[in-house]
Amino acid sequence: MKLNTNYRNLQTSYLFSTIAKKVHTFSAAHPQADIIRLGIGDVTLPLCTAVTQAMHGAVDEMGKKETFRGYGPEQGYAFLQTAIAQYYARRGVTLELDEIFISDGAKSDLGNMLDLFDKDNTVLIPDPVYPVYVDTNVMDGRKIVYVDATEENGFLPLPPQNVHADLIYMCSPNNPTGAVYTRDQLKQWVDYANEHHAVILFDAAYEAFIGSDDLPHSIYEIDGARTCAVEVCSLSKTGGFTGTRCGYTIVPKQISADGLSLNAMWLRRQTTKFNGVNYIVQRGAEAIFTPEGQAQTQSAIAYYKNNAAQIARVLDDLGIWYCGGKHSPYIWLKCGMDSWAFFDMLLEKANVVGTPGAGFGRNGEGFFRLTGFGDAQRTVEAAQRLKEIF
Ligand code: MLT
């Protein structure tokens, strides 16, 4: 028996598991500490009523012989695919239903999608970035080249000259920096991908936080994207589904290589290795896209963005550089020191948990991420504590 020794090249534990362990150790040693968690981007508001009512209705259907459902389609029910297609259509993006695959979230699909790509591909990843993009490729032993996201380029790097890539990861609004690409900038990436016959894996998990029609929510708002981009999206942050689990991935039919269609391959992969998302959750997800669900989820998003604004206000007062927050739940601040040392200091002195920038890559060193996903009052309290230690 031989093991996948690429695992030797990973950090021993996943970033957010390391943080959870550190916080657990600290709270065991300081049981009185009133810890405020603004680390992992986990939502704190409950599911909205449009979603819970739809799920209750689905539970009742499952309890009656006439409406009970067994195995569902692995790629998702047509009612949810239709709701998603209509959501995209409102922004002028036309999708065919069989280009939309329902999943249990972006993280799984981002990892599973790599089944379709040979090990012998060069992967281009912005640094800093959501660690899943890097770790899933390290597990497979793929060559990774990094493109620097820095304070100078507003954490929005553009395609590098004279560098070839086969797979490109992008996340806009970005995790961890909260920076958002403009249409012109995304067009440069789409052109680069088409020139290199590369595939962009576009993570749109935070698209619902965009508060301006001038900024693109989807890569398919850009001409040429259908021949080079897969879009992965999660309802975790849009609909508070971190515990409920539902997302979707769009694989356009135009992407192909070596006589194989990526869409057909993904269908083959999912029907073989994935059981689909349960009916009750899919009915809940469908409700997010109704007018009522949209109003209710947008009100939760406004609440989280207001939290980010409260943190931003304190940073403004302190004269600390940051980005994000406006079209994103994340605030990316310049802590000006080793980011793990800042993590420890913040935890010890203010009992506030954040995420060290170094956990997202080399260029994250000296930066720190706070989330707006907390409770509003607790976030104000955390911001106040931040003020006291700076
Ligand atoms: C984060 O905090 O970066 C995210 O919540 C992680 C995730 O979505 O998996």
Image (tube, grey):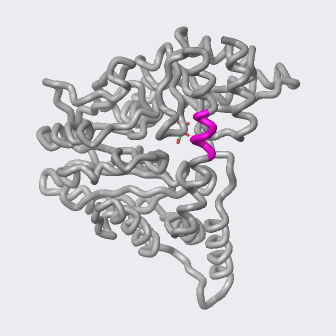
Residue 194 in magenta?
no
Based on the displayed image, in which of its 4 quarters is residue 147 positioned? top left
**Dividing the image into 4 quarters, which one contains the N terminus?**
top left
Based on the displayed image, in which of its 4 quarters is residue 86 positioned? bottom left
Residue 91 percent location from the top left of the image: 34, 59
| Residue beneath the point at 61% across and 19% down | 317
Label the magenta part by its dominant secondary structure: helix
**Dividing the image into 4 quarters, which one contains the C terminus?**
top right
| Residue beneath the point at 58% across and 26% down | 355
Residue sticking out furthest to the bottom: 66
Based on the displayed image, in which of its 4 quarters is residue 143 positioned? top left
Residue 306 in magenta?
yes
- Asked if 243 appears above or below 77 in the picture, the reply is above
Residue 129 percent location from the top left of the image: 42, 30
- Asked if 342 appears above or below 270 in the picture, the reply is above
Bounds of the magenta segment: 303-309
